[in-house]
Image: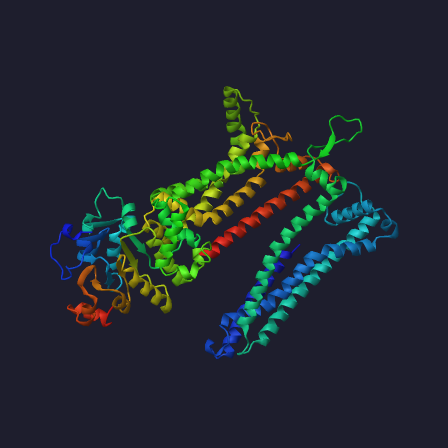
């Protein structure tokens, strides 16, 4: 496909349009841009937009619809005997046609029908592309001429260009929003399919999780229970352990860095702490599974405690270390943004440094700190790699941190890894779990952002 | 309160008949290598308002901040010379700056109420200094302080609302109430009206005049009219030096130094 030369040709035409438009505007103004409504460059952009946008829109439309159109045409050209084939075989046939047209053999001699259809296919493609080239290029030239013709001294080119920029920006942000909607939709539809097999109440409140469904009736150990409470409880337990580690350590280090540390220490310690955020979670996973978990198990046995080698404690501790930089760096930002005048006011009343921090600085920074903690919590709940490697698969419903628990994310991974059919509740359960996870982190993020924003309003 | 006898007077000023509360002798302040305040001698008397005036960067705020050792908080600042509060050396090594600041309160340029309720703003100082044993005593202190700051009537129905929700002038009077609540002997004011509108300024000025009955007040101001309205004594600073000091009335009518005359008539500054 010779798409690239076409795109380059269009781009060249567009830039020619820019210079033509700019030159024409200047000529009309008698060489002085003072006589123009806008700067000469805007007239250039005005023509370039007229030249480029319609042509590229046509190109995009062709790229989007051409395959479907060609396919429908080729299908219609097939003899009635072939058209009467069942859906699956028809698709195979079309594939063969495409492959043959592309010069690749399909392993067997192609039939008459295929050869004829492939010829038709190739000719359609060639004429279609030729038409595209002619059409888009002439559209570009016509747009250029039209834009250039419209230029006169009073033309408000700046206004038009600004409007085009605005539209472009709106489209960009819409793409982001629609992607989110798409993700939610895909989760939602698969979840609905799952909830047709398993009632939502049983899923949300059932106490037994054992997603292995039986293939044969006499199979052992494949009860197929989808009560997700043990997963929620496990996620909660590990996140709680993580937050117990991360909140005090993160907050106190933030207070030290913002209030006590001399600027030289701060310049070294802060980046070092933020390195923690840059470590890949897989590496944290190694650390949890190979260093922390065995250490906890061994020290447990010395103390006479039985600690599983894949304990919630190990995963939680390491996850806590991972989210320390989140909390410390966000808290540090809000603490340093507490106005200096508040500290002065407190010192002026005879308060000591720690009194000032405890009673004035932290309360003033609290909304921001809470926001940071909530963001970190949503990160902890959604974290996957550490728990996959260190937390285990056993869906125990327990509050004992020394036992193995499993989390929502771990189960999603195990349900989807490997060869899976996409119509059993076992696989679909992953989407329902993903939906729950998404809702929880979404709520946490919205609350956190709201809290943070409220705080900002107060001091800016 | 016979601090006068203890004050090491090298050269008595003409206002000797009053009691000197704070006395500065040969005070110099350095920020790093820069000499910001040069050999200042100044007495501030009881129940008087002393105004410090002068163009920007003349050292008047620096001098003010020496009196409650707020300069300690600035890295690289050093103070030499002697500053006495009731004959006691403010820069004595034994003296705890925290206790000093309970005796010498401060009101800042920009109103800076804590993001707490109005009540908690005023109760903050008494709480950290353990001045009240019961809730009733604390209530008493808060109410009297708000009363003295002329704010009680406006806020008595909303003591639990946030102090940051008040208007600028009310916020500044809240900060004054907060300073009064720890029963200081001296109140330092660093351009307390520069962020306020004329009506709020008038109220605060009225308040300053009333507070003179109970406190010694030192005020830094950029407004000559304000200095003339509220103070009994005025000190004019220029480029880190104390140029002239005297009774406010005298100073504004018959300044002795040509720099002072230039400044108060608006020729520079």
Q: Nearer the viewer, residue B119 or A295?
A: B119
* Extreme-right residue of the structure: A81
Q: Nearer the viewer, residue B116 or A76?
A: B116
Q: Is residue A113 shown left or right of residue A392?
A: right
Q: Position of residue B226 (x, y in %)?
A: 28, 67
Q: Position of residue B264 (x, y in %)?
A: 23, 70
User: Where, by quadrant of the figure, is residue A139 drawn?
Assistant: bottom right
Does the image show residue A17? Answer: no
Does the image show residue A172? Answer: yes
Residue at x 42%, y 43% (from the top left corner): A254
Residue B238 higher or lower than B78, as above or below: below
Q: Is residue A227 shown left or right of residue B152?
A: right
The C terminus of chain A - image quarter: bottom left
Q: Nearer the viewer, residue A442 or B115?
A: B115
Residue at x 53%, y 24% (from the top left corner): A297
Residue at x 21%, y 66% (from the top left corner): B248
Q: Position of residue A336 (x, y in %)?
A: 40, 49
Query: How many numbered marks appear?
Result: 0
Q: Nearer the viewer, residue A45 or B14?
A: B14
Q: Position of residue A390 (x, y in %)?
A: 57, 31
The N terminus of chain A - image quarter: bottom right
What sort of colour scheme is used for the picture?
A: rainbow
Q: Is residue A242 shown left or right of residue B167?
A: right
């Amino acid at each position: 496909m010779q798409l690239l030369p076409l795109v380059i040709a269009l781009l060249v035409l567009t830039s020619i349009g820019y210079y033509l438009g700019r030159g024409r505007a200047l000529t009309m103004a008698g060489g002085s841009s003072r006589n123009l409504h806008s700067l000469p460059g805007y007239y250039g952009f005005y023509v370039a937009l007229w030249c480029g946008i319609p042509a590229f829109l046509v190109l995009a439309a062709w790229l989007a619809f051409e395959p479907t159109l060609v396919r429908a045409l080729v299908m219609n050209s097939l003899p009635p005997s072939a058209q009467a084939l069942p859906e699956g075989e028809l698709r195979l046939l079309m594939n063969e046609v495409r492959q043959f047209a592309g010069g690749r053999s399909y392993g067997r001699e192609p039939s008459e029908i295929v050869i004829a259809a492939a010829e038709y296919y190739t000719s359609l493609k060639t004429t279609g592309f030729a038409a595209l080239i002619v059409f888009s290029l002439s559209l570009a030239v016509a747009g250029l001429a039209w834009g250039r013709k419209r230029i006169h001294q009073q033309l408000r080119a700046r206004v038009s260009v600004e409007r085009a920029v605005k539209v472009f920006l709106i489209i960009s942000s819409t793409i982001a929003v629609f992607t989110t909607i798409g993700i939610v939709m895909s989760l939602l539809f698969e979840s609905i399919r799952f909830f047709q097999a398993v009632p939502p109440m049983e899923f949300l409140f059932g106490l037994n999780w054992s997603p292995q469904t039986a293939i044969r009736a006499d199979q052992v150990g494949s009860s197929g229970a989808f009560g997700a409470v043990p997963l929620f409880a496990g996620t909660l337990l590990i996140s709680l352990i993580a937050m117990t580690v991360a909140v005090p350590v993160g907050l106190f280090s933030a207070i030290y860095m913002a209030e006590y540390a001399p600027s030289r220490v701060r310049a070294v310690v802060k980046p070092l702490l933020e390195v923690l955020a840059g470590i890949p979670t897989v590496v944290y996973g190694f650390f949890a599974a190979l260093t922390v978990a065995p250490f906890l198990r061994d020290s447990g046995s010395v103390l006479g405690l039985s600690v599983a080698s894949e304990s919630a404690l190990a995963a939680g501790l390491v996850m806590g270390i991972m989210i320390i930089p989140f909390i410390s760096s966000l808290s540090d930002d809000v603490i340093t943004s507490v106005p200096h005048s508040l500290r002065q006011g407190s010192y002026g009343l005879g308060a000591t440094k720690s009194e000032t921090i405890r009673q004035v600085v932290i309360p003033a920074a609290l909304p921001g700190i809470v926001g940071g903690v909530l963001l970190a919590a949503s990160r902890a709940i959604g974290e996957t790699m550490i728990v996959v490697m260190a937390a285990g698969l056993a869906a125990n419903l327990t509050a004992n941190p020394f036992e193995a628990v499993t989390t929502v994310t771990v189960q999603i991974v195990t349900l989807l890894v490997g060869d899976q059919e996409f119509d059993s509740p076992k696989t679909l359960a992953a989407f329902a779990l993903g939906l729950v996870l998404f809702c929880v982190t979404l709520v946490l993020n919205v609350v956190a952002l709201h809290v943070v924003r409220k705080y900002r309003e107060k001091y800016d | 309160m016979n601090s006068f006898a203890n004050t090491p007077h090298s050269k008595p000023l003409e206002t000797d008949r009053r009691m000197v509360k704070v006395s500065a002798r040969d005070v110099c302040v350095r920020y790093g290598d820069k000499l910001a305040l040069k050999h200042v001698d100044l007495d501030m008397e009881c129940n008087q308002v002393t105004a410090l005036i002068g163009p920007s960067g003349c050292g008047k705020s620096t001098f003010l901040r020496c009196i409650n050792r707020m300069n300690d908080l600035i890295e690289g600042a050093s103070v030499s010379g002697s500053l006495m509060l009731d004959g006691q050396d403010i820069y004595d090594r034994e003296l705890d700056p925290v206790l000093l600041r309970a005796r010498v309160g401060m009101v800042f340029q920009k109103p800076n109420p804590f993001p707490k309720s109005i009540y908690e703003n005023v109760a903050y100082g008494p709480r950290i200094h353990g001045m009240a044993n019961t809730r009733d005593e604390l209530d008493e202190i808060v109410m009297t302080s708000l009363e003295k700051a002329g704010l009680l009537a406006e806020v008595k129905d909303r003591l639990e609302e946030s102090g940051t929700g008040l208007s600028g002038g009310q916020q500044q009077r809240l900060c004054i109430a907060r300073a009064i609540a720890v029963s200081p002997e001296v109140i330092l004011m660093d351009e307390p009206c520069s962020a306020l509108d004329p009506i709020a300024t008038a109220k605060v000025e009225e308040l300053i005049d009333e507070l003179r009955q109970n406190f010694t007040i030192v005020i830094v101001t950029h407004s000559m009219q304000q200095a003339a309205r509220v103070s009994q004594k005025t000190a004019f600073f220029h480029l880190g030096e104390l140029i002239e000091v005297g009774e406010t009335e005298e100073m504004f009518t018959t300044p002795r130094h040509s720099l002072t005359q230039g400044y108060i008539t608006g020729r520079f500054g």
